Image (cartoon, rainbow, N blue to C red):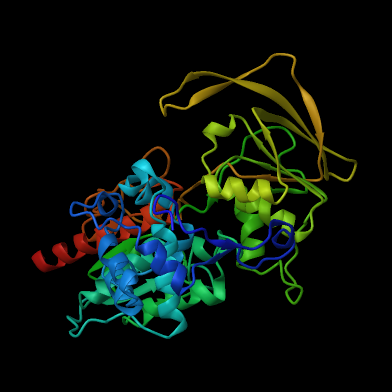
Amino acid sequence: MDVMKKVPVREQDPKVRAHNFDEVCLGYNKEEAMEEASRCLNCKNAQCVTACPVSIDIPGFISKVKEGDFEEAGYVIGKSSALPAICGRVCPQETQCEGKCIRGIKGEAVSIGKLERFVADYGRERGIKPKKSEVSNGRKVAVIGSGPSGLTCAGDLAKMGYDVTIFEALHEPGGVLVYGIPEFRLPKDDVVKKEIENVQSLGVKIETNVVIGKSVTIDELMDKEGYEAVYIGSGAGLPMFMGIPGETASGVYSANEYLTRSNLMKAFRDDYDTPINPGNKVVVVGGGNVAMDAARTALRLGAGDVHIVYRRSEEELPARAEEVHHAKEEGIIFDLLTNPTEILTDENGWVCGMKCIRMELGEPDESGRRSPVVIPGSEFTIDVDTVIMSLGTSPNPLISSTTEGLETNRRKCIVASEEDGKTSKPGVFAGGDAVTGAATVILAMGAGKAAAKGIDEYLRNK
């Protein structure tokens, strides 16, 4: 074994998986996991832990995997994370824990994410549940939203003995985990549902179909229903558009709607009646993970040609390298340094083409990425019948507009402290995409964790 190289992980063949919704990455078996774990240097001052937004004891759980004690490894992770099977699949490990791995300086970093996934799957397949609190303090806390941020906050509070209820607007709990991330990256029944059940096994209650701001307001929860604190983890579900001509045509989706139809409403399954237009020539506008998800979903739904149109170059693609690599393997075409200027329609109002212009990279902007500049006279038209806009999302203003005294910023995000989730309204805390705008699952979990500590401190001192 070459300790400088990762134990490779098995994957479905690209030609086969491009036509099914089964998971792409097949994960490690016991022998592979133990071999990969043996590459860990068990650093005393482990940088991987400081780079993890929920501070998992990474050397601790990996040393248990090395010994073959997978159950104990699960308990070590469980002290810090309520959703290990999800994080092991969708976390950007390469820029976080693995990005700081000392082994990775000379060789390849330890596959921390794949090991976390192995441990979580091992426990789930054997019905091992997280350890719940021995004592209850009877104090009621409401959590709004059952995405990664809300689930983490609720799980941590339940472990501290609080009586926690999550209110979810949709008919299924899970937030972006069920409506946003596709089945082939994150299986819903086998993984997401089971991890949510683990959070419920800690004593957390979940009420679905409750739209906070419509069904009930935050003030009513606190004044009439006896909740002493509220955590807002309602995410960012409001899609953004470019504002170009033709964007309201039939056949133009937001990535949010397209993915929700497929993932939450199961449009990819023959036994469901959810309409979705797979399209024959599909263009996805954008370059993040969501754009990759939408493009790879369109391909699996039966689209002939799928293009990703992005206005910067490959180096600036915000998506994870693994997602871009998977998309390319599956045959998705990348039209980089290209920006749409107009969507063309036929006599029935359906998309029939898209006018684009070529770009070149100029000087870096505030974010440090080089700004795209139009190349004059480089207009051309793409033949297309379905356009999916994947330009990011912002928080729905419903909660902030129905809660007096809750400060928001110009991007309609709730203003909250990163340290403890405190907002401008006493007893109300917030975190995740509702505060930052669209970001990653693990950052939302980190915010949920910080707020659980903040809520505990606030209620103890109250």
Farthest right residue in view: 347
Pick the residue in front: 457 or 329: 329
Rendered residue at 34%/41% (across/down): 105
**Residue 308, visible in the rendered structure:** yes
Identify the residue at the far left of this view.
461
Residue 239 point in image, percent of width and height: 56, 47
Q: Position of residue 169 (x, y in %)?
A: 49, 67
Closer to the camera, 267 or 15?
A: 15
Q: What residue is at 37 percent from the left and 76 percent from the top?
A: 199
Question: In the displayed structure, does residue 191 sit left or right of residue 299?
Answer: left
Residue 54 in which image quadrant: bottom left
Quadrant containing the C terminus in the rendered view: bottom left
Is 49 drawn above or below residue 141 in the view shown? above
Query: How far across and down, in percent of the image, does residue 454 sit?
Result: 20, 59
Name the residue rendered at 55%, 37% in the picture: 317
Left or right, 419 with reference to 325: left
